[in-house]
Image (spheres, rainbow, N blue to C red):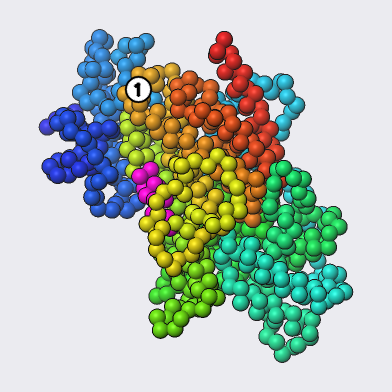
Amino acid sequence: MSYNQFPHRRRVIQACVNCRMRKTRCDAAQPRCGLCASQNVDCVYRDAKQPKIDYNTQVLLERMQLLEDRILLSTSSSQAQRAPPEATPMSHHDPQPDNLHDSTTEGREPVFEVQIPLSHTANANHVFSWSLVQTLLSENSTDQQELPSYADATEVFFQEQQNSKHPSTTSQPLSSWKLYDSSYFSSSRDDSIARLHDLIHLYFTKVNIFFPLLSKSNILNIFEMVTAREVDGNDETATVDMPQYGLLLVVLCLALLSSSGQSDICIEKNHRYSQPFSNSSNIPEDQLRSELWCKARLILGYVSTDMSLEAAQANMLASIYMGASGAVAEAFHWAHATAVKCESMARLQAKNESISDGFRRLYWISFIYECDFISEISIVSPSGIARYEDKIPYPAFTAENHPISPSVPESSEANSIRSQEELVAFQITTNSAIRRFLNTVNSVVYDDKEQFRTRRSNYASWLLRISEDLWSHHSAIYRNLPEFLLSNPSQDVPMTGADTSSPASLQSPTARIQGIPVGNNSWNILRLKGRYYAGQYIIHRPFIEFIVLNIDNFESHPCKDAVLKRSKSCLDGCTGFIKVFDVQTVNSLTCLFPTGMVTFTMTIILMVATIFPIFKDLLPDDVEDVILGGKRNLARFSHSVAEFSWHIEILERLDVARRNRIVRHEE
């Protein structure tokens, strides 16, 4: 066989059922492979029983295929150079499946390409940088008042002027880090102690349900030891370690924030909201919260190199507190610091035969929290916490302190604690699995090291195969969710725009199992549904971009119908996500930055889609209401994250520009 007859073999991740039964090579073409098309039989992939291929092997297979593609490309190019002038593309020895003929240029196929982000983790920044988006913003810029210009959609959160709010630039640190060294406790000390005790209970009711890191008994024990030494003067009480002391202070800060009602954001009401660094509030508990946070920062700085579990937990809660307060830059700082600690601790923990449930919870909550941040922030190298995701197990599904005994009846309190522990384990495990999958989607679909692939004529076919596998896996995760994770008997968060395609309508395999938790927190349910639609959007977004970039010759593309079908999945994901969070009240305790940035990105995509007639039949009938809902959601989020006001103005300007363009096209 001569070199120019090198066979065009395609290594595929999954062969169809027909090819596997006949033990023949499958080209994995869509909608039917070559063999099934020649035999005129159904081509089925999902039912194929394939051995699991780990991610590293998959990457090697893809890159081997890439090298073969390059060989074929160089072969085709050399043949084209030797061919006579009248030669047409049909004379090429090995045409690619997506080859198209350009009627205006004889012998040259159209170039189909899609731009991918330089970092697969910066979704909003990438969409904001689309040339069409920038063109729309410039079309009516002369009619609007000047808006601050930023290089990307997240730069506004990290501007130098934001640091002017920080106490390190406006005041001196406090002279004492001790809890009771405060004017708040100068009178009615017994009442103040009782109030702090109630706040700890409130933390485990209102905050720990989202980030179940701590044990209530441990925090109460730390509080009692601090009170005994600082109030009662009992020197015989053991001294509280500084990481534990800092942990207690941040717990109280979060409890005070939740108690104030400022974490419940409702656009219909004028909620009083004070900045986390502000000392201007006249409300005693707001002043106490500001003072306790300053004390906590002193301790957190002191224990910054401490690698104990409590030090890492305190860092994690500091990130959560800053995120709930709308301080995105500092929240990201503490999240990154926590992940760095977790990476170092995981290196040691992975060598042990057993890993404590406390560290498991911390590791996976830190993993989710940092990954949610870096999904929107352009950074080159994250903490490295993901290196140990295959070595740190998920939290245990039974309460260690409340084992079930078949011979002893379980009390109602023990049953409640066990159910809560099981709910916590399921919650962390499910969110971790989804976040890990979304990371995989990003690394496969948006790999900046594979830019050559996006310039190939068969890019659409490759993307169709990959997205089918990814979407099948993503759907399977939600089909197998426990029923109690997606249900809440009280339904205390009213939803608008609910539809039957919501993950909550999927039949759960645990729906009829007795003795499991009866329901989840409403906001946790919304977040799970949001991740479902976010996955749907992330998997299929490249198809929208592919059409927009190649709109001039897309009509003649052989994969047109399949690409349009996947584009509709992206638009449905955007619609579903916006509707899920179109609720009367949102909870800022879970940090609204990632949710807001995804909302911003999806609203832009829906706006762009309305400009092109090819998307008309793919958009929902109520697309204008959905776009309005996206802007309304971002307005809610801006009550917590003030910088979102800039993104709202961007959306308003895009809305005006795209309406003007639609009118011009109709004329």
Q: How many marks?
A: 1
Residue, x 69% and y 46% (percent of image)? 266
Give the answer, above or below, for where 425 lies relative to 83: below
Magenta span includes 538: no
Kindly report the secondary structure that dominates the magenta region of the rendered protein: helix
Q: Is residue 151 left or right of residue 178?
A: left
Viewer-side residue, 107 vs 661: 661
Q: Is residue 638 left or right of residue 231?
A: left
**Label 1: which residue?**
557
Residue, x 39% and y 63% (percent of image)? 513
Residue, x 65% and y 37% (percent of image)? 632
Measured as percent of width and height from the top left, residue 297 is found at 71, 64
Measured as percent of width and height from the top left, residue 268 is found at 72, 42
Give the answer, above or below, for where 246 lies relative to 2: below
Report the magenta residues as a range.
Answer: 471-482
**Considering the numbered disc 1 on the image, is that residue within a helix, a strand or a loop?**
loop
**Quarter the C terminus occupies:** top right
Give the answer, above or below, for where 128 lies relative to 302: above
Viewer-side residue, 97 vs 111: 97
Residue, x 25% and y 37% (percent of image)? 28
Q: Is residue 82 visible?
A: no
Magenta span includes 474: yes
Q: Is residue 399 left or right of residue 28?
A: right
Measured as percent of width and height from the top left, residue 185 is found at 83, 73
- Tag 1: amino acid: His
Measured as percent of width and height from the top left, residue 392 is found at 43, 65
Viewer-side residue, 292 vs 214: 214
Quarter of the rendering containing residue 206 = bottom right
